[in-house]
């Protein structure tokens, strides 16, 4: 859409309605704005207009977010408005939004655009797209966050109730296994290099591991990297959440993930022994939570190790006792 179109009545009406919905003090004004936006969102023209609004440098973040949410809604609900021969071109047009600096500057807008791409792609040939974007963007630091958000969206949106009933997705584990072959090596590289990235990228990398946990078992190297974040890191809580989920995965899928609880205990338990004088610290709290969750899955092995006087066994049991005491106190 060119500049002339951007100055059209639709553009002005959209800006006015978005501003009223977000800021108008009157409930009647907000209701009228919502009615206009819903009618516009359902129109065929909104496919192109919403993309232009998202790409605009002149709109405030809240207004652009409404446009990005419109793209996501249309990808889920209105694909029948698009001729079949134009769907792949539309998917590529959605992808181009992720490369725009005006989109990447806003995390909420970027996330909604990534979800819209995934929702649209999952209804087409998404594995080839995944292969292409990993090959093209994985070496680009400026696109790291966009790529992580898109890979996360592929895993999460596959379970969306409006998509999982589609024949191409329903019970199609083979596609996820093929996708895991693509995502696994890339995710291992991202995780190992995330130490030098900013906190947003680190947090998204941890979340990506969690989203693909069932299909891409984390490596022992990842366990040690995530344990490193527990101490003095702005993503310490996110790391603890990821490690706890990995511990549960070891219990849920022992044949493919059974090594994780022990690996977690061995990586995190030493942090507890070095922080015995700092029981109330963030590190001690995070490490205690991770070890307690992981140890539950391998308690028989810990007891056997205790009988053999293995030095780590007592440390892990001590952490379980402290966890139980904390639970009682709370």
Image: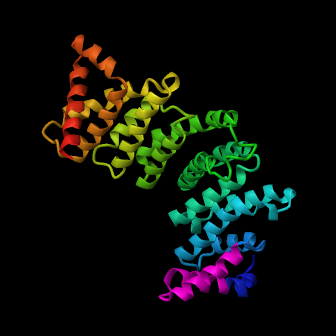
**Looking at the rendering, in which quadrant would you find the N terminus?**
bottom right
Residue 88 higher or lower than 178, as above or below: below
Answer with left or right where residue 45 lies relative to residue 285: right
- Asked where in the image residue 267 lies, by quadrant, the reply is top left
Q: Is 12 or 1 nearer to us in this picture?
A: 12
Residue 303 higher or lower than 94, as above or below: above
Q: Position of residue 104 (x, y in %)?
A: 55, 63
Q: Is residue 15 magenta?
A: yes
Q: Residue furthest top?
A: 308
Q: Position of residue 231 (x, y in %)?
A: 28, 44
**Main secondary structure along the magenta-highlighted residues:** helix
Answer with left or right where residue 112 lies relative to residue 228: right
Q: Is residue 251 magenta?
A: no
Looking at the image, what colour scheme do you see? rainbow
Residue at image position (42%, 54%) is 198
Q: Is 122 or 202 nearer to us in this picture?
A: 122
Q: Is 190 or 310 nearer to us in this picture?
A: 310
| Total numbered circles | 0
Residue at image position (87%, 57%) is 85
Answer with left or right where residue 289 lies relative to residue 49: left
Residue 289 higher or lower than 53, as above or below: above
Residue at image position (58%, 80%) is 18
Residue at image position (54%, 78%) is 60
Q: Position of residue 32 (x, y in %)?
A: 61, 85
Q: Position of residue 149 (x, y in %)?
A: 56, 53
Answer with left or right where residue 264 lies relative to residue 117: left
Q: Is 7 or 101 nearer to us in this picture?
A: 7
Q: Start and end of the magenta stretch?
A: 13-41
């Amino acid at each position: 859409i060119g500049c002339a179109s951007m100055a059209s009545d639709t553009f002005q009406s959209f800006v006015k309605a978005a501003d009223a919905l977000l800021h108008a003090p009157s409930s009647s004004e907000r209701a009228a704005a919502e009615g206009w936006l819903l009618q516009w969102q359902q129109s065929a023209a909104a496919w192109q207009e919403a993309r232009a609004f998202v790409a605009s440098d002149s709109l405030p973040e809240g207004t652009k977010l409404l446009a990005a949410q419109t793209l996501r809604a249309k990808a889920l609900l209105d694909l029948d408005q698009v001729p079949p021969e134009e769907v792949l071109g539309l998917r590529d047009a959605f992808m181009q939004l992720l490369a725009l600096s005006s989109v990447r500057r806003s995390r909420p807008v970027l996330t909604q655009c990534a979800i819209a791409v995934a929702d649209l792609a999952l209804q087409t040939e998404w594995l080839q797209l995944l292969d292409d974007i990993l090959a093209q963007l994985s070496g680009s630091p400026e696109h790291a966050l966009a790529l992580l958000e898109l890979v996360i969206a592929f895993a999460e949106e596959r379970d969306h109730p409006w998509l999982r009933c589609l024949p191409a997705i329903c019970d199609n584990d083979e596609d996820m296994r093929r996708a895991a072959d693509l995502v696994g090596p890339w995710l291992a590289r991202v995780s190992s290099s995330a130490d030098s990235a900013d906190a947003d990228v680190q947090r998204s990398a941890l979340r990506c591991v969690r989203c693909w946990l069932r299909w891409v078992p984390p490596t022992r190297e990842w366990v040690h990297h995530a344990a490193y974040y527990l101490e003095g890191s702005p993503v310490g809580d996110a790391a603890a959440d990821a490690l706890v989920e990995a511990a549960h995965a070891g219990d849920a899928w022992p044949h493919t993930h059974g090594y994780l609880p022990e690996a977690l205990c061995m990586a995190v338990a030493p942090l507890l022994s070095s922080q015995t004088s700092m029981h109330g610290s963030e590190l001690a709290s995070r490490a205690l939570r991770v070890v307690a969750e992981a140890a539950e899955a391998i308690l028989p092995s810990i007891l056997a190790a205790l009988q053999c006087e293995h030095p780590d066994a007592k440390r892990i049991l001590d952490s379980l006792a402290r966890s139980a005491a904390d639970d009682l106190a709370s």
